Amino acid sequence: MPRYRPELSSTSAPLTHEVSALDERGRPSTIAIPAERPLTVYVDKREIVTLMTLGGAPEALTLGYLRNQRLVRAIEDIVSIQVDWAVDAVAVSTRNGIADVEERTAKKVVTTGCGQGSVFGGLMDEVDQIALPHDARLAQSVVYRIVETIRTQQSIYKQAGSVHGCALFSSDGTLLYFVEDVGRHNAVDAIAGLMWLDGMSGGDKVFYTTGRLTSEMVIKGAQMGIPFLLSRSGTTQMGHMVAEKVGMSLLARCSGKHFLLLAGHERLVFEPELLEPLNAPIHAPRMA
């Protein structure tokens, strides 16, 4: 039986915009900067939130946002998602509406995500009910493969800067999704939406973000069922606390062959043979 998918528009917007600039010597040039546009989400004609986004995957972003905010429990509850950039809005139609929507959206926590992410309801709601797989394992060599894949990935960041990227990998380091947006919370929501559309589970997946590992990022990763969260940046105290609470493996400062494993130590398979011995001699370069 084919998997259910709601009716979706397909309205990716231009991701960059060209502007004129003068350098430190007064020389003119034309550079690309990331696009940024508002997207107001309406669910059954009720305004829920306005997201600031690149607009590269607005349908997936909307779906993942509703999923990670716990406003919609099953993808089958959504009939359609239609984006209209003429009015900077997306209309979501559901089968039976969102129960207690006014009460559930009344309390909003502004998070530390760039672009001011927000989470409806108590930030720690339902965290105690999340159970990540204890038997998932990640090899050190796969961590290095992921870091190298991100380093060589073609991206808006390399072209124009000022964006965050998130990626989903298989347990062997194969890249499954890569999404960039003006805020990492948007990028993770878009990946959550893509996973939902494709019926993909998170128990054997690895999530990578270029941004810091905040409590919001850890909670969203846990809600997606992903046991491994990697970043080239650091973590916050609350991000670390939540990771330990849900049993997530947290790897920060991933660059080259360096990383810091901060939580979930039992899941990482160390491979010391991949590294130079600490007491390895330093060879001076030969003189011509």
Image: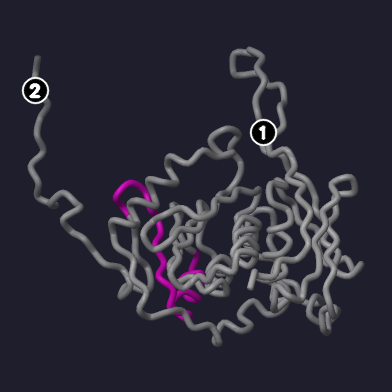
In the image, what residue type sits under mark 2?
Answer: Arg
Judged left or right of residue 46, residue 263 is left
Please name the residue that numbered disc 1 is placed on: 33
x then y, percent, for residue 207: 48, 61
Identify the image quadrant of the C terminus: top left
Q: Residue at x 84, y 46 (%)?
A: 85
Residue extending farthest bottom: 129
In the image, what residue type sits under mark 1?
Answer: Ile
User: Callout 1: helix, strand or loop?
Assistant: strand
Give above or below for 247 relative to 25. Answer: below
First-in-chain label (2 vs 1): 1
Judged left or right of residue 112, residue 131 is left
Judged left or right of residue 50, residue 181 is left
Q: CA distance from mark 2 to mark 1?
A: 45 Å
Judged left or right of residue 57, residue 170 is left
Give above or below for 89 relative to 23. Answer: below
248 in magenta? yes
- State how many labels appear: 2
Residue 123 or 188: which is nearer the viewer?
Answer: 188
Q: Residues within 10 Å of mark 2 (few under 14, many from 20)?
A: few
Q: Residue at x 56, y 65 (%)?
A: 217
Q: Residue at x 66, y 48 (%)?
A: 182
Please name the residue that numbered disc 2 is placed on: 286
Residue 148: name its quadrant. top left
x then y, percent, for residue 45: 92, 67
Please give the range of residues in magenta: 236-258
User: Callout 2: helix, strand or loop?
Assistant: loop
x then y, percent, for residue 151: 42, 42
Residue 56 or 95: which is nearer the viewer?
Answer: 95
Residue 34: name its quadrant. top right
